[in-house]
Image (cartoon, grey):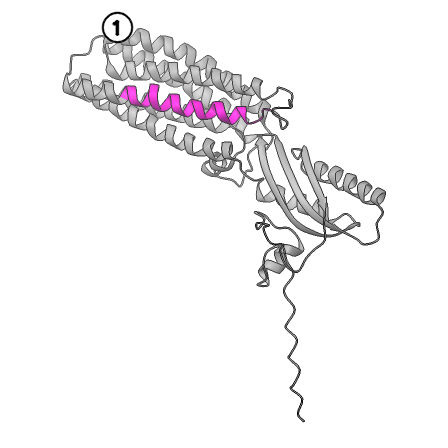
Amino acid sequence: MAGGGHGTKAVVAALLANAGIAVAKFVGFLITGSGSMLAESVHSVADSGNQALLLLGGRRAQLKPTPEHPFGYGRERYFWAFVVAIILFSVGGMFATYEGIEKIRHPHELESVGVAIVILLIALVLETLSLRTAVVEANKVRDPQTSWWSFIRRSKNAELPVVLLEDTAAEIGLVLALAAVSVAHVTDEPRWDGLGTLAIGILLIVVAVVLAIEMKGLLIGESATIADQQKITAAIEVEPSVKRLIHMRTQHIGPDELLVGAKIELVPDMSVTEAAEAVDRIESSVRRAVPSARMMYLEPDVFRTRVPSGEGEPAHLGGTAVAAAAAGGEPGTAPEPAAAPEPASETT
């Protein structure tokens, strides 16, 4: 999926916003002694560090392939996004949860509540601007018919889902902190501040778990989207020299890098030179249809009625193979012909 540049712009906007917000919140905590303010300060510091790690991952992903890493470093973006989830869970979520429990067990009066409210309102405005930037950048690569939750779950871009979730969590956290400080001041019950801090901690833990699950799938390796798989299949099967697409596998090795492997059956009686030229045409056709398909391995093969012993079933089938599977045959094979009737026994 395209969109690395869009993700970088959103990350930079979030980094600048969170760095300023972190300073303002920490000053507010020093003045008021509010646990919610401290939790939000740590949250913003963690977010700033997270965005720096995302930028690091983006730079590392641009390194050229090496003999040790022949497919390049595209997955660095997924790795550092996974680290972000760990930091958000430990530094943000666990700290805020611990601080909230401590404030509930040992409450103390808040000071200069007006200062805390002003700082939280300013932070809310800055976070809203940061979230707006992330939404604008995400809309440049998001299908309008795709919901935001589906975009976060299925996006191959590491940065945009992270920034969207972090900024959304920050907005909710600020509202919780604002409500907790206000209620604690009105009711003269400081335990409300502790409850707000605890709620922020639980929120950050939930967001961190969601991020970790999504980044884990990308680190392990996810296939191309269904739409891209269909485009690749069509680009292969439109080549006149291709008799059928036997099977195909795809895997994202980075947000903008797709690995494609396929077995194809070519028309008979082609010379080696003609087969090589056909493969070159297929690769060019696929890359025109799906520019992210930068690495491609096509293997000319013969369509068999049985899968050879020891070959696993393909993860994705294309063309005729899908029809064979739908007809009840084994994936990647043609339906077996009906067995010929046994000859009648001779009588003497």
In reply to whether residue 22 is colored magenta, the answer given is no
Magenta region, residue range: 73-96
Closer to us: 256 or 29? 256
- Residue 267 at what x, y percent from top left? 79, 53
Identity of the amino acid at label 1? Ile
The quarter of the rendered structure image containing the C terminus is bottom right
147 w.r.t. 35: above or below: below
- Residue 183 at what x, y percent from top left? 20, 21
- Residue 150 at what x, y percent from top left? 48, 39
- Residue 93 at what x, y percent from top left? 32, 23
Q: Residues within 10 Å of mark 1 (few under 14, many from 20)?
A: some
Closer to us: 285 or 216? 216
In reply to whether residue 83 is colored magenta, the answer given is yes
- For residue 64, which quarter of the picture? top right
- For residue 47, which quarter of the picture? top left
Closer to us: 125 or 329? 329
The quarter of the rendered structure image containing the N terminus is top right
Asked if residue 2 lies left or right of residue 210, the reply is right
Label 1 sits on residue: 31
Asked if residue 267 lies left or right of residue 158, the reply is right
**Secondary structure state at the residue bearing disc 1:** helix
Q: How many marks?
A: 1
In the current view of this chain or complex, which residue is farthest to the bottom? 348
